[in-house]
């Protein structure tokens, strides 16, 4: 049997990965790209190598919400790199076209690695069990066999996601500070209109995908994940004084975590 990453790459090449059909909705200020900039871009594409970009091997489409605000929901286009059998990383965009806005990043780790984390760190991570089993996390364009192979690797993993450009809030630039995002864990949480629109655009059938994944082995969610369900919300806030990443006495303004009870 082909290695998982090779299977995914082959499938993507054959199907076109269901992309290039969801343009960004957020305008970007600034002058149109000049002929000089386009020439420089073309030259760089020909001359320079891009190993980290070339390593991206899967396209996943799912949904996130702001930790502490379950009504703040948005679609998230994940472009995933498999680092090894237990660690993946994804760059997240608001669309799947060439001019997509980079919204954030997600780190994905195995259940075994998640269980090694300290309790406070676990609060930052969300489970993928429901997203996979419900079909709301889709791999557009992948044949059923490749989809199942990939999702069998993801169903028992955990993700830590930060969004930096909040395009759902009509921000024309990446304003404000990063936000910790969460994943849905049960029926009735995800806006059905958001899901239906995704299915229409990407030509996927969430109900059918759910049925195909019914026999995937999904473990109970590990203790400590999805802390928002227990009323623990963690987000960044601006504070005076040195932050977590300050060097010596040079920093006078930074960010720190603020934990509060959800309303």
Image (cartoon, rainbow, N blue to C red):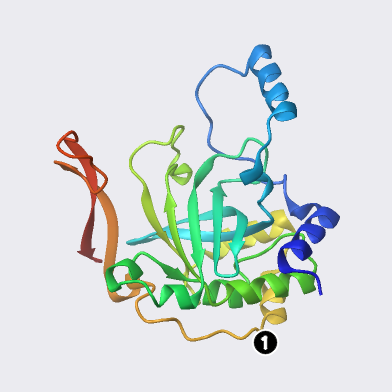
Q: Nearer the viewer, residue 218 or 173?
A: 218
Tell me: residue 132, above or below residue 50.
below
Residue 262: where, in percent of width, then height?
A: 25, 66
Q: Nearer the viewer, residue 251 or 173?
A: 251
Residue found 66% across the figure and 12% down from its top:
36
Tell me: residue 14, above or below residue 38.
below
Q: In the rendered view, does 213 fall on the left or right side of 235?
A: right
Residue 230: where, in percent of width, then height?
A: 29, 76
Question: Which quadrant of the view contains residue 5?
Answer: bottom right
Question: Which quadrant of the view contains residue 83?
Answer: bottom right
Q: Residue furthest right?
A: 14
Q: Is residue 186 visible?
A: no
Residue found 64% across the figure and 59% down from its top:
60
- Disc 1: CA contacts within 10 A as few (<14), some (14-19) or many (>=20): few
Residue 238: where, in percent of width, then height?
A: 22, 43
Residue found 63% across the figure and 72% down from its top:
135
Q: Provide the secondary structure element on which disc 1 rests.
A: loop
For disc 1, the marked residue is 215
Residue found 68% across the figure and 13% down from its top:
35
Residue 244: where, in percent of width, then height?
A: 24, 49
Quarter the C terminus occupies: bottom left
Quarter the N terminus occupies: bottom right
Q: In the rendered view, does 39 fall on the left or right side of 262?
A: right
Q: Is residue 48 visible?
A: yes
Q: In the rendered view, does 53 fall on the left or right side of 246?
A: right
Q: How many marks?
A: 1
Tell me: residue 10, above or below residue 143.
above
């Amino acid at each position: 049997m082909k290695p998982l990453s090779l299977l995914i790459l082959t499938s993507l090449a054959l199907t076109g990965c269901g992309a290039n059909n969801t343009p960004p909705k957020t305008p970007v200020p600034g002058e149109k790209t000049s002929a000089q900039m386009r020439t420089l871009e073309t030259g760089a594409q020909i001359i320079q190598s891009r190993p980290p970009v070339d390593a991206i091997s899967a396209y996943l489409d799912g949904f996130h919400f702001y930790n502490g605000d379950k009504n703040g929901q948005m679609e998230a286009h994940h472009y995933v790199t498999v680092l090894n059998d237990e660690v993946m990383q994804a760059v997240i965009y608001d669309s799947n076209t060439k001019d997509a806005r980079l919204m954030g990043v997600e780190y994905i780790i195995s259940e075994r690695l998640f269980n090694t984390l300290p309790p406070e760190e676990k609060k930052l991570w969300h489970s993928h069990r429901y997203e996979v089993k419900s079909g709301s996390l889709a791999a557009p364009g992948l044949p059923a066999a490749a989809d199942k192979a990939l999702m069998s690797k993801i169903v028992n993993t955990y993700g830590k996601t930060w969004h930096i450009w909040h395009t759902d809030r009509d921000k024309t630039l990446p304003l404000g500070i990063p936000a910790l995002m969460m994943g849905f864990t049960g029926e009735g949480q995800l806006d059905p209109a958001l899901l239906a629109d995704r299915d229409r655009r990407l030509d996927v059938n969430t109900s059918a995908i759910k049925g195909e994944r019914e026999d995937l082995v999904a473990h109970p969610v590990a203790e400590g994940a999805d802390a928002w369900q227990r009323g623990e919300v963690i987000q960044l806030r601006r504070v005076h004084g040195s932050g977590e990443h300050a060097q010596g006495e040079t920093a006078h303004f930074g960010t720190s975590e603020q934990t509060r009870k959800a309303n």
